[in-house]
Amino acid sequence: MGPERSGEFMQYTIDGELAQVANLTLDKGNTCWASKGSIVAMDPGLGWNLKVPGGAGGAARRMMSGEGVALTFLQASTDGQRVTLAANQPGKIVAWDLDGGPVITTRGSFVAAFGPQVEIDVRVAKRAGAAFFGGVGLFLQHISGSGTVLVHGSGDFMERDLGQEEAVLVSTGSLAAFAESVDYDIQGVAGCRRMAFGGEGIFMTRLTGPGRVLLQTLKREPARPRRGPRS
């Protein structure tokens, strides 16, 4: 079992090796947003329903983001209610403290968010080229406010803390999440032979600091349908 940590008001641990899970303990009135289909097990005193963050205005953008229109919204009716959350494929889970700034998660990397004031929205990608050719996607999930976000990465995580104007090139499917302060665009792969036989595609995503970047060592598989808690 991993070390016990706490957000503003919620205890949680991140456990496991090949396919990590997050174990959360909620007291009465505590709430948590979770990705649809992420619940592995939960106590009977913990209620859940499907809810659209930000109301109906963001529903269309959420659908385009690939994360689904609604998220799972958990709320405890008594103290000490536990829930276990997991992603839909093997990998690691890492916590992102929103006090350090908002985070942008790519498709399939959001697990949960909780805290006194968490806001979840979908933003249009800053660069059209990165959206269509870099693998980042046109619509990205943006989480801000005060609290903790749990991010999933396929395989293992590689973390980079980019300085001002420091850049890194990322292969398609290898980007899990990054700070709002990080700029992103695409860069072409030079040379016809590398384009045809290099296996990295024609473009790579260029991330420019300052800010934190979370990379995943296994390229993410296409998302499977999620239908609420697992049976």
Image (cartoon, helix red, strand yellow):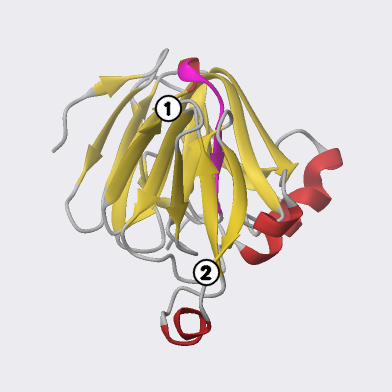
Which range of residues does the magenta coloring cover?
100-106
**Is residue 213 located in the magenta-colored stretch of the structure?**
no
Q: Position of residue 122 (x, y in %)?
A: 71, 42
Q: Residue at (59%, 61%) from the top-left corner?
A: 134
**Is residue 103 located in the magenta-colored stretch of the structure?**
yes
**Mark 2 residue type:** Val
Residue pointed to by mark 2: 189
Q: Which mark is residue 115?
A: none
- Apparent side of residue 121 relative to residue 150 in the rendered image (left or right): right
Residue closer to the observer: 140 or 228: 140
Q: Position of residue 224 (x, y in %)?
A: 52, 70
Residue pointed to by mark 1: 163
- Apparent side of residue 139 relative to residue 168 in the rendered image (left or right): right
Q: Relative to 12, say whether 65 is above or below.
A: below
The N terminus - image quarter? top left
Q: Is residue 52 visible?
A: no
Give the mark count: 2
Mark pair 2, 1: CA separation: 24 Å
- Residue 141 image-quadrant placement: top right
- Apparent side of residue 133 relative to residue 5 in the rendered image (left or right): right
